[in-house]
Every structure is written in structure tokens, then in C-alpha cells.
Amino acid sequence: MQNKLQELTDQLYNQGLAKGREEGDRYLEQAKREAEATVAAARHEAEDIIANAEKAAFELRSKAEADIRMASTQALQATRKDIENLVVAKIGAQSSTADPAFLKEIILKVAERFSATEGSDIALVLPDSLRAELEPWVQASLAKALGAPVQASFSKKISGGFTIGPKDGSYFVSMTDKTFEDLICEYLRPVTRKLLFGE
């Protein structure tokens, strides 16, 4: 009887142990699956975070590079423009439109052509700052060279150069500092750009 009881006890124990082991294995398997699912979800979320961070970093870098390119292009264009302006201003300053000897030579050539084609008396407007040097020359040498009187007036509005036209004022040709500078700027800028920048 005791053997039977021992057998029964052992059988119950073994069955309980087997059932407990089986249930434990099931729980362990379920825990493994849940852990794997959690790890997979975490890995997927980490990959999404990394991909989003890389995309944001790429977009930020692209935007920064575009901004830098635009800023450097604008700075380069502004610098080129400044260099062109300096060159043009230097050439304009060297054109000597405020030099009396240069002006006398130019005025004489223009006036000779002007009086030959127009056949009328000439009126000049000259820089007031050069009155002392130019007024006697206009009244004597220029009038003699043209064989006709020349009316000359002097203006503080002209710093260099002159305007010339018929005495009746029907029109005039301007050869002042401003018109020389405009002419130089118009034709010199492409040449200057090519010389300075190879464009």
C-alpha cells in the first residue's frame, strides 16, 4: 500500500512537474516572442529615427550649401561690380576733362567740325573752375581758328568737359564729365569684365 501511495505521489509529482515545466516553457516561449517583437519594434523605430535624422541633416546641409552658394555669388558679383566701378572711375578720372590743355584740343577739333557743317556761330558752356585758363583762349585763339566769334559762358554745374551748340540754342552737344563717364561705362564695362574676370 505504501508502495502504491509512493507511486501515486511520484506520478502526481511527475505530472505536476511536467505540467509546470510545459507551462513554464510556454511562458518562456511567449516571453521570447514578446521580447523579439519589442526588440524588432525598437529596432524599426530606431531605424526610422536615424532615417529621419539623416534626411533632416541632408536637407539642412543642402539648404546651408545653397545659401552659402547664393551669398558667395552675390558677394562675388558685388565685388566685381565694385572693381569695375573703380576701374571705370580711374579711367574716367584720367580722361582729363578738367585739364585745360586737353579741353582746348578737343574743343578745337569739335568746333572746327561743328562750324564746317553748321555754318553758324558757336556757343560754348565751360567749367567755371577753368574760366581763367579758357576764357582768353576762346576769345582769341579759338575765334581766330574758326574765323568767327565764339560765345562762351561758364557754369559751376560742369566740373569738367563742355557743351557746344549753335548760338541760337536750338540744340547742343554735351561732352561733360558725366557724358564721358557714361560713354566709358557703356563701352568699357564688357572689356573691363573680360580683362579682369575672363568673361
Image (tube, rainbow, N blue to C red):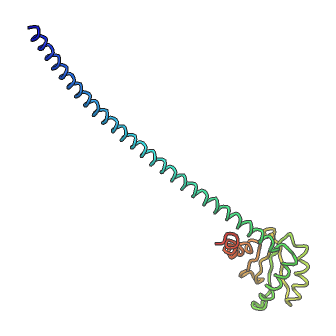
Q: Residue at x 32, y 34 (%)?
A: 38
* Residue 75 spot, x, y in % from top left: 64, 59
Q: Residue at x 22, y 24 (%)?
A: 21
From the viewer's side, name the closer residue of 25 and 193.
25
| Relative side of 154 to 54, left or right | right
Say how many tags the image has.
0
| Relative side of 23 to 147, left or right | left
From the viewer's side, name the closer residue of 80 and 102.
80
Q: Residue at x 91, y 84 (%)?
A: 140
Question: Quarter holding the C terminus?
Answer: bottom right
From the viewer's side, name the closer residue of 127 and 59.
59
* Residue 52 spot, x, y in % from top left: 42, 45
Residue 13 vs 117, above or below: the answer is: above
* Residue 35 spot, x, y in % from top left: 31, 32
Residue 49 in which image quadrant:
top left
Residue 170 in which image quadrant:
bottom right
| Relative side of 35 to 72, left or right | left
Residue 85 vs 42, above or below: the answer is: below
From the viewer's side, name the closer residue of 112 and 1.
1
Residue 37 vs 154, above or below: the answer is: above
* Residue 87 spot, x, y in % from top left: 74, 68
Q: Residue at x 80, y 86 (%)?
A: 121
Residue 175 in which image quadrant:
bottom right
Question: Quarter holding the N terminus?
Answer: top left
Residue extending furthest toward the top = 2
